Amino acid sequence: MAILVTKWFGVFLVDERSHSIIDKRLMPMDPVVVAEKLASIQRGGILDEERELAALVPEKLMVGDRRQSELGKPELFDSSFLTPQKFGYDDAFMHEAMMGLGKLRTSEPVPRDKNLVQAIRNLDDQIATINLYNERLHEWYGMHFPELADYAKDSRYADLIARYGDRDAIIEELGIDIQSIGADFNDKDMRAVMDLADTLYRLYDDEERTEQYIQEIVEETCPNMCAIVGGPLAARLISLSGGLERLSSLPSSTVQLLGAEKAMFRHLKSGKRPPKHGVIYQHPEVHKAPYWQRGNIARALAGKILIAAKVDQYKGEYCGDKLNEEFMARVEDIKRRYPEAPKKPQKKNKPRNRGKPRRH
């Protein structure tokens, strides 16, 4: 039985039992070329040398790497007996080739889903900063015009303060007739508050542009996931998993619990109830479902998300609408099967020991 083994210094066709080399294709003595071939391997490609050797064994070929699955059946194989020194490659050449490989890989274009991960984390930082600034502005400006919080919210609140500052000007802008109980600010104090409000307003603007950017990436990179869970939730799932490629490789049970890691660790540590869902709780069908149906609906949704992620990752044909229809049909089936909450088992009362003396 022959097995195809690829090392950084060459490709070998080896007899599995005797460990003898049937044929080989060594890498050229050029570190630049070696680096390019290794980069192709890391990207999941198959070398011409691998195809040449695989053609010599048309039937029952085994391969030592899952990347080569189209050439044969993957099999674990100890190839440590193949060392570079036996074929004229020294440590200095290996070092030069690996340095070239590192430069090639780091200069490659970054996949858009990796930018999406960073964008989601940036959005989380922006939201946290906005909440902090918003709380500070309400507390500070509330000493001057506390009633404004009843008439303006979020970015509108910050915009009014940044543009007008004084409460009389804001009251005129809003067209309301109220008497404020707030204290007066001098010019320097008002300018400081207006600067804070201006910063907060610009943060709201940055947040909106980041959300638009995220939506554009999601619609481009994972249209099938968008069809099932929408852009924001699809982006959140990709961010939690570390990228679309890794998301597509996870089991559906892990997809179901993404975002609920703390609850899962608490369950494992203390024996409390395990979580039924993670961030996919934000999906309307999971969120609005009765508690006894949520686990089944979340499980069905995770399965469809995983299929959509695989199709998006490997650029398959669009099937988002079909997956969404199948999911909704499954939701209706769950509602029909479990219309009412399960009855809790009644605890049996322990018989009392009567007539027996207590032990001291």
Image (spheres, rainbow, N blue to C red):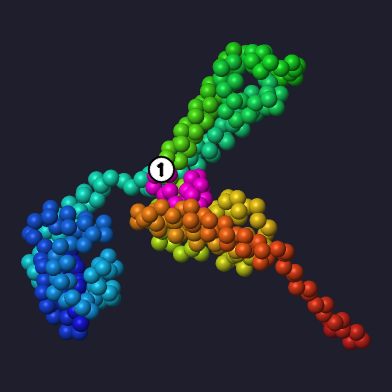
On the rendered structure, is 359 left or right of 181? right
On the rendered structure, is 70 left or right of 228? left
316 relative to 341, above or below? above
| Residue in front for this viewpoint, 62 or 359 | 62
196 relative to 344, above or below? above
The quadrant in which residue 63 appears is bottom left
Q: Is residue 261 visible?
A: no
The residue at the point 59 percent across, 15 percent down is 164
The residue stretch that appears in magenta: 219-233
Q: Measured from the top left, where is residue 150 in percent x and y?
A: 70, 27
126 relative to 165, above or below? below
Q: Measured from the top left, where is residue 59 in percent x and y?
A: 21, 78
Q: Is residue 291 visible?
A: yes
| Residue in front for this viewpoint, 88 or 17 | 17
Taking the magenta stretch, the answer to whether it contains residue 335 is no
The quadrant in which residue 131 appears is top right
Q: Secondary structure at mark 1?
A: helix
The quadrant in which residue 165 appears is top right
Badge 1, how many Cα within 10 Å: few under 14, some, many 20+?
some
Q: Measured from the top left, where is residue 14 in percent x and y?
A: 16, 77
* Secondary structure that dominates the magenta span: helix
The residue at the point 12 percent across, 77 percent down is 21
Q: Amino acid at mark 1?
A: Ile
- Residue marked by disc 1: 217
Q: Measured from the top left, where is residue 275 in percent x and y?
A: 59, 61
